[in-house]
Image (tube, helix red, strand yellow):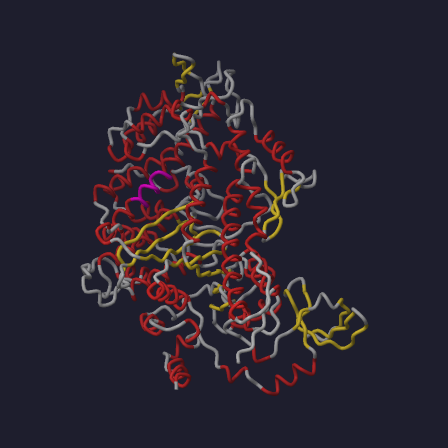
Amino acid sequence: KKVIKFYLLRFTMAEEPLKYLSVHREKVSDALAQSEWAQKKLVWVPHPEAGFLSGSIKTEKGDELTVELQDGSKRTVHKDEVQKMNPPKFEKVEDMAELSFLNEASVLYNLQARYFSGLIYTYSGLFCVVVNPYRMLPIYTESVVDLYRGKKRHELPPHIYAITEQAFRNMLLDHENQSILCTGESGAGKTENTKKVIQYLTSVAAAHHPHTKTLQRRGSSSLMVKTGLTGSQGELEAQLLQANPILEAFGNAKTVKNDNSSRFGKFIRINFDQNGFIAGANVETYLLEKSRAVQQTPDERTFHIFYQILNGMTPQAKTEFLYEKPEAYTYLSNGNLAVSGINDANDYEDTLEAMNIMGISEEERTSVFRVISAVLHFGNLKFKQERSSDQALLVDDTIAQKISKLLGMPVTEFTKALLKPKIKTGREFTVRSQNMAQVEFSSQALTKALYERLFKWLVARINRSLDRSLKQGSSFIGILDIAGFEIFKINSFEQLCINYTNEKLQQLFNHTMFILEQEEYKTEGIDWTFIDFGLDLQPTIDLIEKPMGILSLLDEECWFPKATDKSYAEKINREHGQSGKFSKPDFRSKADFTLVHYAGSVDYCCDNWLMKNMDPLNDNVVQLLASSSDAFVAALWRDTANIVSLTARGDDTAAPATPSTVFGAQQRSAATRKGMFRTVGQLYKEQLSNLMSVLTQTQPHFVRCIIPNHEKKVNKIVAHLVLEQLRCNGVLEGIRICRLGFPNRVLF
C-alpha cells in the first residue's frame, strides 16, 4: 500500500515540475535493450573531447581489446583503458551509488543523460550533485515545497529540498546539529542552492508558529520573488531571507564565468528551538575578494552595490554623497558595464527594501553610502613626482577634499599623512618621503581595507538583527557556501587558502563516508579492517598548517629583516623538498613550488605573498580614520591593533622606487610585540579551524555544484570540464573510496 501511495504521490504532482524531477522507470526498463546490452559487451572508451565513447568489444587477445565505437570506427585498446557500461535499467538512475559498475564514465554519462532531460539533481551516495541548468525551472514553487515537506529522501526525486528536509528531520528526531556543505567553482550554482535551502527552512520551520510576529509586507514584488518572501513567514524568517540580497549586493560581482558570482565564502547558522521553529541566525564570512574594489579584468565588474547606487540613486542623493558619473571613476575599470538580465536601478530599490526589512536604519544606510562614495574617490587621487626629489605630490586636492569630507578627516592632515607619513625612530618621529608608486600603492591598500571593514560591519549588523538571545536555539543547521577547489595556470596565496579549505572539507567527507560505510559492514557482520580514509589527505594538510609548514614559514619570513618573496620560496623548497606531497617545478615554470592535493597537483607562485600576509596600511591615515568626526567611520576603524605599518621597513635606508615587499622586526608596534598582531594566514587558519570544529560536531550533508560549460548555454555539457569538477569536488574521490569497500549491494 505504501508503494502504491508513493507512486500515486509522484505522478499526481503538477505536470510541469514533474518532468524536471522524475523519470518514468518503465521507459528505461526495456527487456529488449537489456538483451542487446548483454550480447554486445558494451564498454566506455576514453575520448579527448567527448570524455568517453560507447563501444562494443569485438575481439579479445590477452590484454588487448578491439572495440567498435558508436561511430562505426574500431580501436585497439588495453583492457585497463576501458570502463564497463551499466545495464539499460540504470539509465538516468537517481542515485549513482546503485550502479552495477561505479566508474568515471558511467557517472559522466548518467549526469549527461539526466541533464539533457532537464533533471539537474542527482544523488551519488552521500553527495547531491547539481548541474547548473542556465535557465529558470519550475521546481522551487510553494507546491513543490509542500510536496517534500515531511518526506524521506528516497520517497521523492533528488532535490535540494530533499537534502534540506532530511537535515531538518534528523535535527528534530536525533537532536543532533546538521550542516549542508555547498561547494563548486564560480558559476556552478552554490549561492542559488544555498538560497533554496534557506527558503525551504523558512517555509517549513515557520508554518503555524504560535508566536510568529508577521512582518507587514512592504516593497516590490520582485524582491518577494527573488527572496522567496510569502505571507506565511514571520519577521525573523523574513529578515533571514533578506540577508542574501544584502550580502549579494555588497559581496557579489559579475565575472567572466558568472554574472552573480559570490566573491566571498559564508557559513549561515540557523538556530531552532526545541519545537523546530527558527529561533535566530548568524552569518560568518570568509576571504572577501577586496582587490575587486580597486581593479577588475576586462568584461568584469566590481561589487553590484556600486552600479546599483550609480544607476538607481536619486540625483539629489548623489549630490549629497558626492557621487559622479560612472565613467569618471578610475576604480570602475570597465565603466558602467551593463549585464544582461540585471537591472541595477531596480536592484538598488530591492537592496534598500531588504536593508529596511533587516532593520538597518536610514542613518546607517546614509553612512554606508558615504563610505562607498569615498571608496570610489580614492581611485581618482592623482599624484606626480617632484622634480628635485623622489617625493610624490598631489596634482590638486579637490578629490582629497571630497574624501576628507565623506570620512570626517581634516584634509590637510589627510594629505600630509598620505604623502609624508611620520614614523617613530627611537623616541622621536621623523617624516618619511614617499614616491609616487608608494603613495598609489598605499592609497589602494587603504581603499581595499575600507571596503572590507564596511563589509564586515554589514555582516555584524545583519547578525545583530538576526540574533534572538532571549530565545536561544537548542539545535542548528549550518549552510556552507564556499568556493571549490581551484587550479589555475598560476596560483597565488588566495588559491592556497581556498584549496587548503577544500582539502579539510574533503577530509571531513572521506571520514564521514566511511565511518557510516564501515558501521554498516559491522552491522552486516562483514569481516573488515577499519580504515580512516580521511588520513589520506593529512600529509598535504600538514604541509600547509603544521609548525614549519607553508603558512608557518610565511609568518616567520614576514618578520625577518630583508626577507623577500624570493627568500621565502627558497626557504620552503629547502624545508620541504624531500616531502612526497611537495615538489619544485621545472626551471622554466613561473611557479615556485608544487603541492599534491586530492584533486591534483597545483603550481603556486609566491609573488607578493609577504605583502598579502601582512596586509600593511599607512598607519598615519588609519589613525585619522580611527579619530574621525564621523562616528560611523571611527567605529569601522576602532580595532587597529592588527595593522602593520606600510611606512615602517626592516632597514632605515631610502624608500625604494616601487612598493616594497621587505618586512622586518621594526614594523612591530607595542601591541604587536605583546603578541596581539596576527597575520592574514594566521587569522584564516584560526577561522578555518573554528569552522571545522563546528562542522565535525554536526551531521554533514554534501551538495556538489557543477558548471556544465563556460558559455552559459542551456543543454550543453563539456565532458572534460565536468570530469575535472567531479575530481575537484571530491565525487570521484568518493567513488575511489567506495571501490575499496563493497560498492555493490543486494537487498534481501
Magenta span main SS: helix
- Side of 362 relative to 456 (left or right): left
Nearer-the-camera pick, 219 or 505: 505
The picture places residue 473, in percent across and down from the top left corner, at 28, 55
The picture places residue 742, in percent across and down from the top left corner, at 59, 69
User: Which quadrant of the view contains residue 398?
Assistant: top left
Quarter of the figure that contains the N terminus: bottom left
Callout count: 0
Nearer-the-camera pick, 679 or 18: 679
In the image, residue 254 above or below residue 82: above
- Side of 237 relative to 195 (left or right): left
416 magenta-colored: no
Residue lying at the far right in this picture: please name it. Answer: 61
In the image, residue 626 above or below residue 724: above
Specify start and end residues of the magenta stretch as a single range.
452-460
The picture places residue 7, in percent across and down from the top left corner, at 41, 83
Residue at the (50%, 16%) spot, across then down: 652
- Side of 608 relative to 189 (left or right): right
- Side of 481 relative to 734 (left or right): left
Nearer-the-camera pick, 610 or 330: 610
The picture places residue 118, in percent across and down from the top left corner, at 47, 72
